[in-house]
Image (cartoon, rainbow, N blue to C red):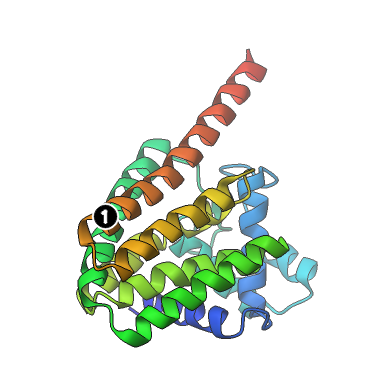
Amino acid sequence: MASNNRLVDDQANAVVKPKARITQASAIRQAIENDILSGVLKPGSPIDEEELAARFNVSRTPIREAMLQLQQGGLINKQPRRHPTVVKLDLPRLVHMYEAVSEMEALCARYAADRINSRERDELQKVHQLAGEALADGNANDYARYGRHFHSIIMQATHNSVLVETVNKLALHTLAYRRFQLTRPGLSEQNQSFHEEILAAILAGDGDRASDAMRRHVTLSGDVLADYISMGESALSDTRN
């Protein structure tokens, strides 16, 4: 529960102060995420925490916290008294995860359209505006944070704590991949268009349209990454033959 609450809190803080310094653990986690998703760290390879401490010039404490965040996000495996290792990407499981998340977030959008209050409406519009400005400025980090908070506000607007906890638990395993897919050309703009459609439907109180738009939005994220992984696996297979 604490990790889920921390996720929501981090997203909220990112919107209030988007340019505030992130924690050492979060910075380390993001750097390792980039290494994993760019192929610098290969699937199955060990991660030496002492080397990381030297690389980032920090104590072992933020390294351990970053490892925990990566483990919760499904990017590394950690066994007692062993180095953590990069997980081998399981495409079928990843697709199944996105299927589940897309349905749960679609339900959130449907409920939010009926239950969102005036404060949440204002905040959702403001966050979407700020995301658009970050996108126009080419600020990918701020854009990603605003995008996550956009989803967080919609979840909170369901006013259903069980649903929020469930979606946060599922979404935790896709956050790194969702951030990665935004690096592909044109995907951030497409992402913003989906948010525009979702926002308009929620503000209009149209639960069916909000649900459908959110489902298509999240499903597309999974499809893009699945295509990327499949191409990578094909290329790797070709080099071995």
Residue 220, x across and y down, in percent: 42, 43
Task: Label 1: state its secondary structure.
Answer: helix
Comparing 65 with 102, the one in front is 102
- Farthest top residue in view: 241
Q: How many tags in the picture?
A: 1
- In the rendered view, tell whether residue 220 sits above or below residue 142: above
Comparing 215 with 119, the one in front is 119
- Farthest front residue in view: 204
Comparing 117 with 87, the one in front is 117
- In the rendered view, tell whether residue 107 sits above or below residue 221: below
Few, some or many C-alpha atoms within 10 Å of disc 1 (few <14, some 14-19, many ≥20)?
many
- Could you tell me which residue is drawn at 74 percent across and 63 percent down? 51
- In the rendered view, tell whether residue 20 sits above or below residue 78: below
Would you identify the image quadrant in which residue 28 lies? Answer: bottom right
112 horizontally vs 119: left or right: left
Residue 156, x across and y down, in percent: 32, 77
- Could you tell me which residue is drawn at 50 percent across and 42 percent down? 88
Would you identify the image quadrant in which residue 93 lies? Answer: top left
Q: Is residue 2 visible?
A: no
Q: Quadrant of the N terminus?
A: bottom left
Comparing 218 with 227, the one in front is 218
Would you identify the image quadrant in which residue 124 lies? Answer: bottom left
Residue 237, x across and y down, in percent: 58, 20
- In the rendered view, tell whether residue 72 sits above or below residue 63: above
Q: Quadrant of the C terminus?
A: top right
Q: Is residue 4 visible?
A: yes
- Could you tell me which residue is drawn at 49 percent across and 39 percent down? 224
Q: Amino acid at mark 1?
A: Arg
Residue annotated with mark 1: 209
Residue 87, x across and y down, in percent: 50, 47
- Could you tell me which residue is drawn at 65 percent across and 54 percent down? 34
